[in-house]
Image (spheres, helix red, strand yellow):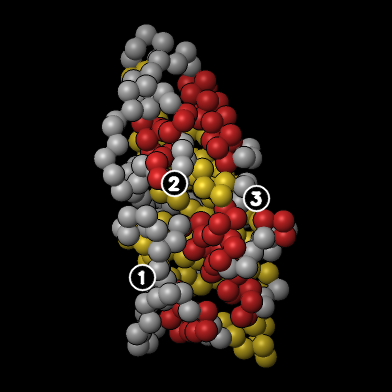
Amino acid sequence: MTTHDLPLGRHVDYPREYDASLLFPIARSLGRAHIGLSDDALPFTGFDRWNAYELSWLDARGKPRVATATVTVPAGSPHLIESKSLKLYLNSFNSTRFDSDDIVRATIAADLSAAAGAPVEVAFGLPSIGNNDGAESIDELDVAIDDYGPPNAGHLRADPGAIVEETLTSALLKSNCPVTGQPDWARVIVAYRGPRLDRAALLRYLISFRDHAEFHEQCVERIHSDLQTHAQPQWLSVEARYTRRGGLDINPWRGSHGLAPPPAGRDERQ
């Protein structure tokens, strides 16, 4: 497919049979170039964890099977996978017979790995719902906001005289799909050790994404890059848990090299 063929924003026929060609990979380098990142020297590790709620296929005798799945795409892969194409691809399983559940799982893993350009993990089931990240919300701060985009890293402030280790969260992150303009909603979790972040400044910065058009994965990489540049923490973790759309939610995480990933989980809004 070319960008002109992108299925977002136009009528697309429901897939009648399994079709791996429905997957639409997008080069990560395109978004990273805008924030001064190079695939050859990424300042973070991470992954994009997709939760799939609407997965079905036919068994060898034609009886429908249903499942949920967790898909983990490494941030080091050369491509991200566009979300509507992933939805259409998963829907293409609905009327196709497979000899076993494991063949379905292995087929999805192989196809997504080919599209992403790196090994993708697929497991049936979903993380449990629950906020176990120990984060402190900054959403009730008494601040005036008048900047809704583009993302303004100039808001960020940190006190180099106070070194802390803390986890902050905001459920007020909103950006827009770069193709359709539809809103994307998320809770973002920022964990770090380093100069104490000005919480009001962090909130203003996150809200400055509100009218910005960028893919989920790119927004998280921008947040990580801006915080690293303006606060210079010793280590940094940024995760966003986006709300569900089309039976899928995406949870990109980017963290300093050597940092353990946060525990998998889902929010009630997802």
- Give the answer, above or below, for where 43 lies relative to 194: above
Identify the amino acid type marked 3.
Gly
Residue picked out by circle 2: 3
State which tag comes first along the sequence, 2 or 1.
Answer: 2
Label 3 to label 1: alpha-carbon separation: 28 Å
Name the residue: 57% across, 46% down: 79
Mark 2 residue crowding within 10 angstroms, few (<14) / some (14–19) / many (20+): few
SS type, badge 3: loop
**Closest to the observer: 181 or 70?**
181
State which tag comes first along the sequence, 3 or 2.
Answer: 2
- Give the answer, above or below, for where 37 lies relative to 232: above
Question: Would residue 71 be seen by someone viewing this image from the given angle?
Answer: yes
State which tag comes first along the sequence, 3 or 1.
Answer: 3
Identify the amino acid type marked 1.
Asp
Residue picked out by circle 1: 211
**Closest to the observer: 8 or 135?**
8
The percent position of residue 53, horizontal first and vertical second, equals: 37, 39
Label 2 to label 1: alpha-carbon separation: 23 Å
Residue picked out by circle 3: 76
Q: Which picture quadrant has residue 144?
A: bottom left
Instruction: Name the residue at the left extreme.
Output: 11
SS type, badge 1: loop
Name the residue: 41% across, 10% down: 60
Instruction: Name the residue at the bottom extreme.
Output: 161
SS type, badge 2: helix
Label number found at residue 238: none
Label 3 to label 2: alpha-carbon separation: 22 Å
